[in-house]
Image (cartoon, helix red, strand yellow):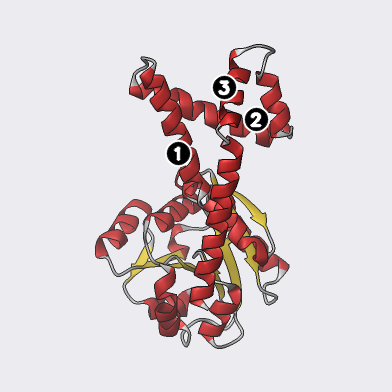
Amino acid sequence: MDKIIGFIGCGNMTKAMIGGIIKSNLVNPKNLIISDIHKKNLDFVSNKYNVKTVNDNKELAKKSDIIVLAIKPNIYNLVIDEIKDFVKKDVIIVTIAAGKSINNVEIEFGKDIKIVRTMPNTPVFVGEGMTGICYNDKISKEELEEVVGIFKCFGKTEIIDEKLMDVVVSTSGSSPAYVFMFIEAMADAAVLDGMSRDKAYKMAAQSVLGAAKMVLETGKHPGELKDMVCSPGGTTIEAVISLEEDAFRASVIKAMRKCTQKSKEMAKTTI
């Protein structure tokens, strides 16, 4: 890709995305521009990745073909108001903020503009992210492929209807937290039974990683894979029954639905 990609905001997500983009050789580092109010963040990416940095969002807007708004939702209106008169005519705006609808961003720009709304998650930091993507009717097939190509540099992607973006938040955006809690609980149990903490975390985390890969790579239903582990009268089915008695699956479903509802409520407050 020979387009100039600009990132407004240089937090952890931006750093992870830049790392993935450069590692994949998608673009030359000289085609990346990053702006941020914190000089130490800019110095970090400049020194590590040899990318161009600026402290002026308007300068970035003038030069960028694709602009990623990697900022907090509560300052979107301020940043958009700052750059809207300086962006290129055919610029593609990529958002990564929960609760910011495409319509909301269109209104804030106050003109026809190409928008791709995305929701990546924190595993992008290790190249295993999951990103839900939707877009407005001004984005061409080729432009969509370009944006999808960016996010494929650090994980997997899925095109979804925007009405499902709140579900994406609970299914992949927030879900790493649930998995971390599960791993921690597994490790706590192992420690309780005498295993060292470091070994417990490693064994629990690798088991979760391996189980997830089996779902993705075998194409088998998770229930079928679960049944493969549950020998008659064995240890696994004993644990599964205990989890069912404590409403394990119902608790997960309830938590995710609360997460989805919260995302919907956040969207209402930003419109």
Question: 118 or 30, which lies in front?
Answer: 118
Badge 3 or badge 2: first in the primary sequence: 2
Q: What amino acid type should be assigned to the residue bearing mark 2? A: Met
> Which numbered marker is on residue 231?
none
Q: Kindly report which numbered mark, 3 or 2, lies closer to the viewer in this rendering.
A: 3
> Which numbered marker is on residue 239?
3
Say if mark 1 contacts mark 2, CB within 8 Å: no
Q: Is residue 83 above or below residue 120?
A: below
Report, in whole angstroms, how far the alpha carbon at label 3 lies from the one at label 1: 19 Å
Rendered location of residue 172, percent (x, y)? 56, 50
Question: 105 or 31, which lies in front?
Answer: 105
Q: Badge 1 is on which residue?
A: 180
Other-residue count near label 1 (Cα within 10 Å), few / some / many at <14 / 14–19 / ≥20:
few
Badge 3 or badge 1: first in the primary sequence: 1
What residue appears at the point 50 percent right and 68 percent down from the top-left corner? 266
Identity of the residue furthest to the front in this view: 245
Mark 1, secondary structure of its residue: helix
Q: Is residue 227 above or below residue 5?
A: above
Q: Badge 2 is on which residue?
A: 214
Report, in whole angstroms, how far the alpha carbon at label 3 lies from the one at label 2: 20 Å
Rendered location of residue 90, percent (x, y)? 60, 79
Judge from the rendering whether residue 15 lies leftward or rightward of residue 252; answer left or right: left
What residue appears at the point 51 percent right and 61 percent down from the top-left corner? 262
Q: Using the rendered view, name the quadrant where residue 39 is placed.
A: bottom left
Other-residue count near label 2 (Cα within 10 Å), few / some / many at <14 / 14–19 / ≥20:
some
